[in-house]
Image: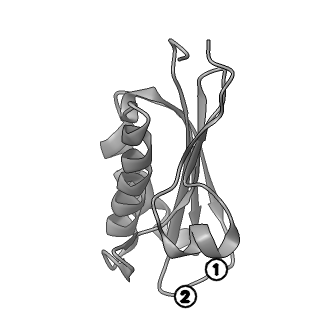
Amino acid sequence: MSSEVRKVVTGAPWEEQFGYSRAVELPNGTVLVSGCTSVVGGQIAGGGPYEQAVNSFHVAFDALKQLGLGAEHVVRTRMYITHARDVDEVGRAHKELFDEVRPAASMIIVSGFVDPSLVVEVEVEAYRGDAA
């Protein structure tokens, strides 16, 4: 087992501005992925809650991929939404992406995000069973 903490930095503007990594892999094989939104190439991709959720999870998957992991390694998700009316659409996106994986999950209603056009933010935690 490695004692090194590995970090994924994607170059997203808020990573540099606020001083964080997109993902961090701990020596025990646990991977923590920071909050991901539907910002792709500096623009909000997908207008509704379903599309934003799918895009947000794909941002997280891209970070996991850089560590050699995929959705099947995800053990926990957190979905932050700005309105209760979006529960079903965000839940539908989660089911489509994780129905076979069945991670522990939370969905939390928050007052808003740094850009008011965003209605969903997600976090994922993954586990590398064969910790590198």
Pointer 1: residues within 10 angstroms few (<14), some, or many (20+)? some
* Looking at the image, residue 67 lies above or below residue 14: above
Instruction: Return the residue nearer the eye: 110 or 38.
Output: 38
Query: Which image quarter: residue 43?
Result: bottom left
Q: Is residue 95 above or below residue 13?
A: above
For label 2, the residue is 116
Q: Residues within 10 Å of mark 2 (few under 14, many from 20)?
A: few
Q: Amino acid at mark 2?
A: Pro
Left or right: 79, with 11 as reference point: right
Q: Which mark is residue 74?
A: none
For the residues labelled 1 and 2, say whether their Cβ atoms are less than 8 Å apart. Answer: yes
Q: Report which residue position mark 1 lands on.
A: 112
Q: Residue furthest bottom?
A: 116
Tell me the residue at 42%/60% (across/down): 56
Spatial CA span between label 1 and label 2: 7 Å
Image location (x, y in percent) of residue 13:
52, 75
> Of residues 51 and 86, which is closer to you in this image?
51
Name the side, left or right, on which 33 lies relative to 101: right
Q: Residue at the location (39% across, 41% down)?
A: 66
| Amino acid type at mark 1 | Gly
The percent coordinates of residue 1 (x first, y second) are 62, 12
- Front-most of 66 and 43? 66
Residue drawn at x 38%, y 30% as measured from the top left: 68
Which x, y percent locates residue 25? 60, 34
Residue at (37%, 43%) from the top-left corner? 95
Horizontal and vertical percent position of residue 54: 34, 58
Residue 30 against residue 42 in the figure, above or below:
above
